[in-house]
Image: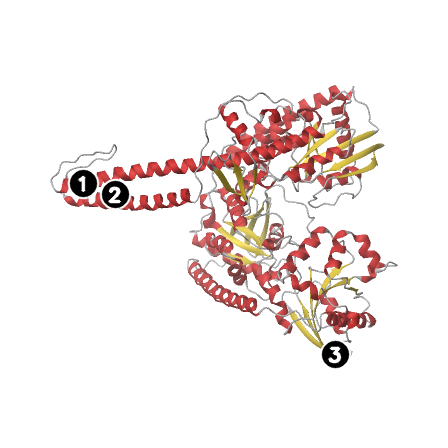
Amino acid sequence: MENNPGEKQSITPPEVRLILIGGRWAGKSSSGNTILRKERFECGRTRTGQSEVRHEVVEGRKLIVVDAPGWSSSLSLTEIPEGDKQRFKLNPSKCLPGPQVFLLVIPIDSAFSVKQRRTVEEHMKLLGERVWRYTMVLFTCGDFLGEKIIEQHIESEGDALRWLIDRCRNRYHVFNNKDKSNSSQVTLLLEKIDEMVQYNNGSCYEVDEQTFTIIERKQREVLERAEKRRRTAEEQREQMRSLIPEEIKSIPKLQMILLGSRNVGKTSVGNSILGIKEQEDGRRTAHSVARQGFVGKTEVTLVDTPGWWKGFPECDTPEAIKEELVRSMFVCPPGPHVFLVVIDADASFSTKHLEALTSHVELLGEEVWRHSMVVFTRGDWLGKRTIEEYIEGEGEALQSLVGLCGNRYHVMDNKNTDDGTQITELLEKITETVAGNSWTHFVPDGQKLKTIEERRGSVEERARLRESRAKAKRKFLRDSKHKLQELRIVMLGEKTSGKSATGNNLLRNEVFPTYQNEHCKAEEGKVADRRITVIDTPGWCCKSIHCTEEMDKEIVRGLSLSPQGVHAVLLVVPVDLAFREVQRVSLEDHMKLLDTSVWKYTMVLFTYGDKLADKSVEEHIEREYSALRWLVDKCENRYHVMNNMKKADMSQVTELFAKIEEMVAGNSGQLFCPDMRDIHLRIDVKFRWRKIKHVLKQGFEQEYRRREQELMMGFKEKLLELQADIKGRETGTKPKLLIKGVGLRKKDGKEEENIDAKISQEIEKLDKDIMRSTHVLHSSMDWLIPDMKGDSPASSIAESLPDRKQSTSDFDKVLGWLSTFQIGTNVENNLTLNFSQSSGYRSVVPHDNLDFDAGADILQ
């Protein structure tokens, strides 16, 4: 517990050391100038690339102000580049012995959402829990308050901002940096800092010497490796330059393809290369499009391609985008000279990102890497660091990518488009790459294009058939439907599928927070002359291992928010990610918790409709995995598309309401109103049997290991016998053993010695495997399933659910027997299955490593 500051004597430190931290464009540098009452920090469009320190005497006291680089809106530490994390940790060392206050700069002119809260929280973790003791919120853009006071703004913003103020122990101040002549705002800030220093007994945030030493050592090592990489790259360029004849000043024609994930700046790179200065419209690249232009005397054809979601492998990317990636090679015949793989230098690059990128790039062919170069965007983020420092500091994944591209890389600052040297140097590097490939272009596989064209025709035909069936059904129901004065809708789906944004669109009001909500929420509104109730539910996880009983109960609780029932269950599915078998299993697992009649009231609601571009939703359904067609067919071909980027388009909302009314007419006006007791019983059984399934799986795995060990032991004995026979042959003894598939010819003894040596190596390897297997078996308890007789005790539980049949198989009896025993966790957090005292068996399973998806689904 802290002391009451009122009981202390006033402390006015002769020196004030403070650090300005916060997001990009929050107003840190401008606030630093206001505090110092001089223009000491550069403001405007130029981003603070590295921590800057300024000294000034203000009101008779020495101020040391550190302006730290702003952070991006990364939600987790894993998305922050390693170098940025290290430099953020070193900020306190810029004003030794340490800052008395961190001014956390928050602009008033933009909302402080849960997303911003998480970003702040993740960055503050880098400095440890003690940093909050020395932190004060500094609000900027104070002129946006108008007639309100700052306390009213804090209370009106919501829980996220109130959380931040509480973490800072109710310490905050407001700046209007447009009114720098108002010196009183600085005077009042210094008074509040004095109070904080007094509250903290005159202490400061002390630098952790060990952390400081470790980071400095890592940075020295990075600098050494970066310099080595730079020299290697330059030597490599010299070799490539030697392949270019002197008479060739520039390559006459050059064809390039831009590849990369979304929002990394591919289109900006293309515009910079072609000298296009027009403002981008912000729309996503949906097709592979070729553009032409001249760079000097070189005729350039540049193909921009659709991006994939960063960190998601190609199996999660919709088929339409993958087809466009492959098609990119054929829009610049006879093929590209180089692929520019675009990476943003202001974000992390992990193994996950490497696997995602390589899986997409290699769709183009095996030889693609020989013709590839990494282009880093947002070079302004690097500050005074070199791109080699970023490569070496980020880790093995990025180094592997650069290695795949033959150590060919370039960095671009797209905000400095007037700097022509970066384009000139890029074209020089590309020319050297082409020279290294004997001036040849990448030859695409024509069969790939043929396959795409054939598939496209089949997809379009099936899409027309699906659309005609949907229209025929709607026409049939249209005559029997009537406009409902009230519609009750519940939305279900995976996390980040767009449920909340869609709910806001349906109600024409921002009532649901558009982040990963953890609780159900029902909101009402009058839309299109109807009273609309929308129930938003938490999204479920794709992998069942992450689904908990509490989460499932909260999801289904949404139905209880409308006791009369709901007219429609909208299954929300984003079109910008593939809907595969794993998504189908997860969805069906949750739908099984509801009554089987739920499908009569269910419609697929596709979100991110803007990502369809000029393709119909029927084409998307037919082009994707069969799991998506299964889902649409399960919903009796009922589906709708929402583009939440076009909120002004009311027609998509009214059309959805019309489709729901038609579905209600098909259900004779009835609402979906399941028995919540049955639903909770299904949830209870689901998780009880999940535990049983895991215990069984562990036992089967042990039995498998035991049998595997027996086979290895048997094979070792055969090898020993064969080795003995070979040695007997050397002494004139007739061989006793022949192994099928192994023929021994009588030659000189040298061949037999070689065979003997190989057998000895195999025996030695088997010995290691057997020892390893023995260790695994000895580390776990023996596991047996006794013979069971009689009916399953679990039958009474299972049969209380609808459509449950009597189970009489031996396996069901085993499961029934297991269900009678207590399942729990012990003090080591291990899952335990307790047998009777007389059985002598007890199974212990590590609870923290449960993987319910692995292996065969023995409960199906």
Check disc 1 and report its element: helix, strand or loop: helix
Residue type at mark 3 is Arg
Residue 478, image x, y percentages:
77, 22
Confirm whether residue 782 shows in the render: yes
Query: How many C-alpha atoms fall within 10 Å of the one at disc 3: few (<14), some, or many (≥20)?
Result: some
Residue 829, image x, y percentages:
55, 46
- Would you name the residue on which mark 1 appears? 726
Q: Which mark's residue is nearer the viewer, 2 or 3? A: 2
Distance of label 1 from label 2 (alpha carbons): 10 Å
Question: Which quadrant is the C terminus positioned in?
Answer: top right
**Do residues under tags 2 and 3 come within 8 Å of each other at their CB atoms?**
no
Left or right: where 457 falls relative to 228 = right
Left or right: where 741 falls relative to 809 = left
Confirm whether residue 255 shows in the render: no
Query: How many C-alpha atoms fall within 10 Å of the one at disc 1: few (<14), some, or many (≥20)?
Result: many
**Do residues under tags 1 and 2 come within 8 Å of each other at their CB atoms?**
yes
Q: State which quadrant residue 14 falls in.
A: bottom right
- Would you name the residue on which mark 2 appears? 759
Q: Closer to the N terminus: mark 2 or mark 3? A: 3
Distance of label 2 from label 3 (alpha carbons): 83 Å
Check disc 2 and report its element: helix, strand or loop: helix
- Would you name the residue on which mark 3 appears? 61
Q: State which quadrant residue 99 falls in.
A: bottom right
Query: How many C-alpha atoms fall within 10 Å of the one at disc 2: few (<14), some, or many (≥20)?
Result: some
Q: Is residue 61 or residue 455 the one in the foreground?
A: 61
Q: Closer to the N terminus: mark 3 or mark 1? A: 3
Check disc 3 and report its element: helix, strand or loop: strand
Q: How is the image coloured?
A: secondary structure
Q: Is residue 669 or residue 420 the one in the foreground?
A: 669
